[in-house]
Image (cartoon, helix red, strand yellow):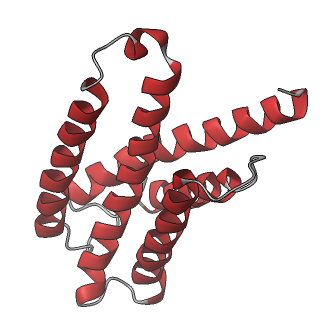
Amino acid sequence: MSIGLQIYTIIHVVLSLAGIGSGFAVFYGLLTDKRLEAWTRFFLVTTAATSVTGFFFPVDRFLPSHALGVTSLLVLAVATAARYRHGLAGAWRWLYVVGAVAALYLNVFVLIVQSFGKVPALRALPPSSPAFVQLTVLTLFIVGGVLAVRRFRGLSLQPS
C-alpha cells in the first residue's frame, strides 16, 4: 500500500471514529431530550465525510461498502433536512431521530465488519461470532431508537 493510500485510510478511519463517538453523544441527547447542537453538527459532518471518502478507495467495481455509503448519505440527507430545513416539525422530528440513529448504526456496522476482518483476536473467534455481534448490536439500536423516538421532543436547546 502506498504512503498516500495509507494516509488517506487513516483520515477515513479517524473520520469514522469521530462520527461514531459524536454519534453516541447525539444518541444520548436523543434519549435525554437534549438537542446538543454542536455534537449534532459534528456527527452529521463527520459521518457524511466518512461515507464520501469511502467512495475514493481504489477498487474496480461497485462493492457492498459502496451500497452502505449511498444508504448512509441518503439517511443523512433526510436527517439533516428534518433537523435544519424543517425544524423537527411534525413527522420530521421522528424522521430526524430515525435517520440519526440509522446513520450511527451503519457506521457501527462497518466498524464491526472491519474489526472482525482485521483484528487477529476477533478473526480467531468462531465463524458465527460476527453475525451474533451484528444481531445483538442491531437489536440494541432498534430498542434504543424506539426509546429515542418516544423521548426526544426537540424542544429544549441544550449547549454542547
Q: Where in the figure is residue 144, as x and y percent of width and height? A: 17, 52
The relative height of residue 108 versus residue 31 in the rendered view (above or below) is above
Which residue is painted at 27% across and 39% down in the image? 134
Relative to 25, 51 lies left or right:
right
Q: Is residue 91 left or right of residue 62?
A: left
Q: Is residue 62 left or right of residue 136?
A: right
Q: Position of residue 126 (x, y in %)?
A: 27, 16
In the rendered view, does 94 fall on the left or right side of 119? left
| Quarter residue 51 falls in | bottom right
- Residue 29 position (above or below residue 118): below
| In the image, residue 50 above or below residue 8 | below
| Image quadrant where residue 142 sits | bottom left
Picture coordinates of residue 73, whole percent (x, y): 53, 68
Which residue is pictured at 32% across the width and 82% down the height? 88
Q: Is residue 33 visible?
A: yes
Regarding residue 41, the answer to whether it shows in the image is no
Identified at 53% across, 37% down, the residue is 17
| Nearest to the observer: residue 127 or residue 98 | 127
Whole-percent x, y for residue 50 in the image:
61, 51
Q: Name the one closer to the observer, 69 or 63.
A: 63
Q: Quadrant of the N terminus?
A: top right
In front of the other: 96 or 5: 5
Q: Is residue 136 above or below residue 99?
A: above
Q: How many marks?
A: 0
Residue in the image at 35% along x and 51% along y: 105
